[in-house]
Each structure stands twice: as C-alpha cells, then as structure tokens.
Image: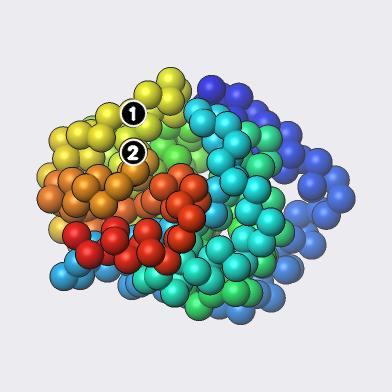
Amino acid sequence: MLDDLYAGALADAAARRDLLPLADVERAALAQTPAIDARAALQPADRVKIIAEVKRASPSRGALSDIADPASLAHSYETGGASAISVLTEGRKFKGTLADLEAVRDAVSVPVLRKDFIAEPYQVFEARAAGADLALLIVAGLPQQKLIELHELVLELGMTALVETHSAEEVVRGLDAGATVLGVNARDLTTFELDQDLFGSLADSIPSGVVRVAESAVKSPADVAHYRRSGADVVLVGEALVVHGDPVDALTTFLEI
C-alpha cells in the first residue's frame, strides 16, 4: 500500500511538473510570505495541542466527507483551538489537492501542514509555494539519504518538517536526519493496521526538546487523553473531526482532557 501511494504521488507530481516546471515552482516558493514558525507553535505546554486535519477520504475507510469548503472547515478548527491545520493534498486515495492547501492557508493564522507522500524536491517547493509552514516526511517511505536531503530542503525554505515514524528504528533514523518535530503514527502504512499503544512504547526514546506528535487512532477525548498520558505534546486528529457534526465542539472536548 505504501509503495502504491508513493508511486501515485510521484506520478501526479510529474504530471504537474510537465505543466509547471521546477524553476517556476522554485520562484513561487521563494516569493511566498515567510513560513510561520510551526515548531514554536507546537512546543510543549500545560495542555495537549491538536493538529486538526482536513481529510476527505482515506484508503482504510474510503469517503469520509465531501468538504466542499476546506477553508471554512479550517477556520472552524482554528476557532476551536487547533494549534495547526493539516491538509491532505494527495488526490488518488485521500481526494485532496494543493488548492485545498492554498485555500486553508488564506483562511487561518495558525501553521498549515502539507500532508502528502513527499519523495522529491519538487513536492517540497510545491508545499512552500502553496503556503505550507510544515511538510510531512515519512521515514518508512524514504531512504535515509533522501530523508536527510528533503529535511534539509524543508528547513532551507523556512518550513518545519513533521517527520513521521512507526518503529524504534525509524525514530532513530528520524532523529539522525535532524527531526525537531517527530510523529509516531499508530497506523502501519504498509498494512494499515492500528496500534494505539505504539506511541507510548516509543515516547521515551524521543529526547527532550523534540516535539512529540501522536498520530492516528483518535475517535474520542479518551483517545487524546491516552496519548497525553503517554507523553504526547501534540495529537493529530483527522477522521474524528471530519465526521463530527460540530468540529468546534469536538475540538473543545478534545482540548479539555
């Protein structure tokens, strides 16, 4: 599944590059308003912080919500107290677009994450050109040298990398690449199976000073509380907010744990 997701993302990026060459995207990225300091926004605090996700669909659950107006949803997330907004831009399985990211960036004042299967510099420049403040780098999908190169490029463009892991070995690789915001995804992207206790088993291996983000397997405030007790500074929540009738109310309950 992970190989297929990367292959599709790279094929779609190649099609966009045919229409808009790398040099043009680089110029657009460098002309953007400077990125918000997302690491500062996600720093540990007295209570958990939430990255709220704009997510239409997923390979594991299929369609979740049409989200005709991603900017309005993101504004609701910010009103509800989200510290950052994640936007799925992968089109084949998650039904997202870079236009969603651009619309969200214009609608909120908190940092915005491009969540996609990024494996080449073109996609990083696209993220910055569209206004992203963070870019997702998934350790499982990248050789170590490529992970290091992309992480360096993210930083050069003034963004923050959310480096995603799913094992003790991947945590080490992420830290070796320079991660200062490190996520542990409860979902194994090769099988899509969930293990909500994985974060807790790895949290102690993430050093002080690195922002610890728990990802996936959140359906209720109890799940957020579970991650917080396990040492999470930040919890990324997608499906539970998208399918809730009132995202502001949902976020309020998540932040009251």
- Residue name at image x 59 percent, y 46 percent: 65
Question: Does residue 78 sit above or below 118 in this rendering?
Answer: below
Q: Tell whether 219 sits left or right of 100.
A: left
Question: Does residue 243 sit above or below 61 in this rendering?
Answer: below
- Residue name at image x 60 percent, y 68 percent: 72
Between disc 2 and disc 1, whose residue precedes?
1
Residue 144: image location, x then y, percent: 42, 36
Residue 152 - label: none
Residue nearest the viewer, comparing 187 with 79: 79
**Answer yes or no: do the residues labelled 2 and 1 have beta carbons within 8 Å?**
yes
Type of amino acid under label 2 = Ala
Residue 248: image location, x then y, percent: 42, 66
Residue 173 appears anywhere in the view = no
Instruction: Residue at the far right: name it.
Output: 19
Q: Tell whether 101 sits left or right of 199.
A: right
Residue under numbered circle 2: 217
Question: Does residue 15 sit above or below 132 in this rendering?
Answer: above
Type of amino acid under label 1 = Leu
Residue nearest the viewer, comparing 234 with 204: 234
Q: Alpha-carbon neighbours of circle 1 within 10 Å: few (<14), some, or many (≥20)?
A: some
